[in-house]
């Protein structure tokens, strides 16, 4: 059994698949919350922010969400990028240890959800479940300016568990993303993409794709 239970938020529009994830992870004593769309996922994430959260430069969607009502403003320390000159602020303790996002969903897709979550919490660990790993990696570098953990669909439940419980992967990704910072504003060539994919594959111990 894992050393400690993880709090996991999942966005997956296929209920049969998401319920399989939930059952497998709960057998490992993890706490799992399912959402069936990108919209309900980000709403759940925002609704469960710690009351001490500090948001720096939120996206327009975060600013418009029902969570940002008058009572919420009283609970949260809202900092504007125009008034805070010491750099981005974000809360340290997230309500979820991991967010697993289906890359292709109707309406608000996984990439859109990741943008919103990272705007609130740049340190959130996110895993994309995608049948299109090259496309997903390319778009994560282009849109998120980061390499995000990937799992290629379809994958076994044992691989899901191994990926989720490997906490070293996220730490190793930080080093990889330092290098990504140098290429993210340039055109991402096919060879650079393949190199990143291979490095990510090694970090994830060749088990995710």
Image (tube, grey):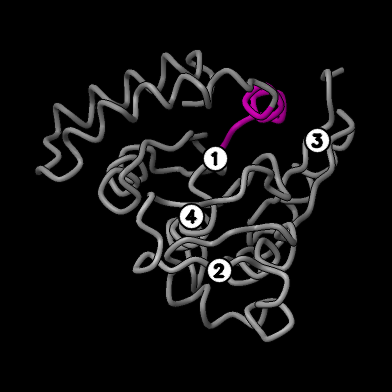
Q: Quadrant of residue 38?
A: bottom right
Whichever of labels 2 and 3 marks the residue nearer the N terminus, that label is: 3
Q: Decide which of 183, 75 is in the foreground and name it.
A: 75
- Asked whether disc 2 touches disc 3, contact meaning CB atoms under 8 Å apart, the reply is no
Q: Decide which of 153, 52 is in the foreground and name it.
A: 52
Element type where label 4 sits in the image: helix
Whichever of labels 1 and 2 marks the residue nearer the N terminus, that label is: 2
Magenta: main secondary structure equals: helix
Closer mark to the observer between disc 2 and disc 4 = 2
Residue 183: x %, y % from top left? 16, 35
Residue that badge 4 annotates: 114
- Residue 191 got which mark? none
Residue that badge 1 annotates: 127
Closer mark to the observer between disc 1 and disc 2 = 2
Residue that badge 3 annotates: 25
- Asked if 65 appears above or below 9 in the picture, the reply is below
Whichever of labels 1 and 4 marks the residue nearer the N terminus, that label is: 4
Residue 159: x %, y % from top left? 64, 24
Q: Residue at x 45, y 43 (%)?
A: 131
- Range of magenta residues: 154-164
Closer mark to the observer between disc 2 and disc 3 = 2
Q: Residue at x 39, y 43 (%)?
A: 132
Q: Residue at x 53, y 43 (%)?
A: 129
Q: Is disc 2 surrounded by few (<14), some (14 to 19) or many (20+) residues within 10 Å? A: some
Residue that badge 2 annotates: 78
Q: Quadrant of residue 127?
A: top right
Disc 2/disc 4 C-alpha distance (Å)? 21 Å
Element type where label 2 sits in the image: strand
Element type where label 1 sits in the image: strand
């Amino acid at each position: 059994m894992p050393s400690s239970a993880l709090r996991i938020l999942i966005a997956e529009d296929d209920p049969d698949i998401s319920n399989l994830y939930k059952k497998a992870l709960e057998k490992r004593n993890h706490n799992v919350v399912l959402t069936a769309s990108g919209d309900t996922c980000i709403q759940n994430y925002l609704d469960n922010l710690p009351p001490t959260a500090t948001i720096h430069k939120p996206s327009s969607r975060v600013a418009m969400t029902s969570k940002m009502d008058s009572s919420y403003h009283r609970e949260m320390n809202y900092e504007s990028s125009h008034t805070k000159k010491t750099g981005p602020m974000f809360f340290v303790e997230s309500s979820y240890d991991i967010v697993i996002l289906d890359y292709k969903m109707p309406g608000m897709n996984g990439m859109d959800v990741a943008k919103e979550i990272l705007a609130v919490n740049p340190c959130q660990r996110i895993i994309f479940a995608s049948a299109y790993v090259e496309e997903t990696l390319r778009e994560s570098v282009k849109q998120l300016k980061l390499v995000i953990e990937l799992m290629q669909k379809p994958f076994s439940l044992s691989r899901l568990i191994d990926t989720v419980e490997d906490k070293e992967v996220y730490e190793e990704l930080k080093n990889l993303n330092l290098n990504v910072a140098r290429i993210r504003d340039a055109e991402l060539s096919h060879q650079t993409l393949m190199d990143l994919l291979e490095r990510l594959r090694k970090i994830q111990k060749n088990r995710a794709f």
